[in-house]
Image (cartoon, rainbow, N blue to C red):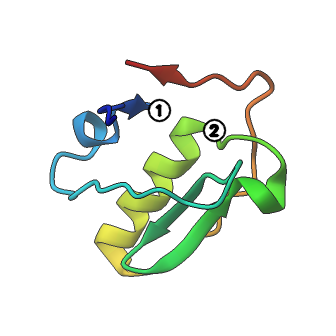
Amino acid sequence: MSATVRVEYWDLKAAVPEVLVTGETGRSTSFEVTIDGKLIFSKLESHGFPVHEEIIGAVKKYLSSKDVTKVTDIQKESYCIIL
């Protein structure tokens, strides 16, 4: 039996249209964000989900300067929508 599950965290593509957003299955309870292979956020390290605007800001900064900024702020309330 197989199923297609789409997990929508937020629409990064709408905020930064020029990026290619991909996803893959990670370790259990993990949620990691990388830019060109460089880790900028790890739920396993921070024990929460990132603040959306912080990820968007880090992506925009990287696109303009190639400077990788780690995101450490986590949401006060975490949520994930499974469609």
- On the image, the x and y values in percent for residue 33 come to 52, 60
**Which quadrant: the N terminus?**
top left
Residue 44 against residue 78 in the figure, above or below: below
Residue 20 against residue 83 in the figure, above or below: below
What's the mark number on residue 9?
1
Task: Name the N-terminal-most of marks 1 and 2.
Answer: 1
In the foreground, 13 or 3: 3
Picture quadrant where residue 60 is located: bottom left
Residue at x 37%, y 81% (from the top left corner): 66
In the foreground, 80 or 54: 80
Residue 32 horizontal side relative to residue 15, left or right = right
- On the image, the x and y values in percent for residue 39 come to 57, 74
In the foreground, 25 or 13: 25
- Examine the rendering and report whether any part of residue 68 can be seen: no
Marks 1 and 2: which is nearer the front?
Answer: 1
Picture quadrant where residue 44 is located: bottom right
- On the image, the x and y values in percent for residue 47 come to 84, 48
SS under mark 2: loop
SS under mark 1: loop
Dot 1 crowding, Cα within 10 Å, few <14, some 14–19, many 20+? few
Q: Amino acid at mark 1?
A: Tyr
Q: Residue furthest front?
A: 1
Inter-mark Cα distance, 1 to 2: 11 Å
Residue 67 against residue 73 in the figure, above or below: below
Residue at x 17%, y 46% (from the top left corner): 17
Residue 51 horizontal side relative to residue 22, left or right = right
Residue at x 42%, y 65% (from the top left corner): 61
- Examine the rendering and report whether any part of residue 22 can be seen: yes
Q: Amino acid at mark 2?
A: Val
Residue at x 47%, y 32% (from the top left corner): 9
Q: Which residue is mark 2?
A: 51
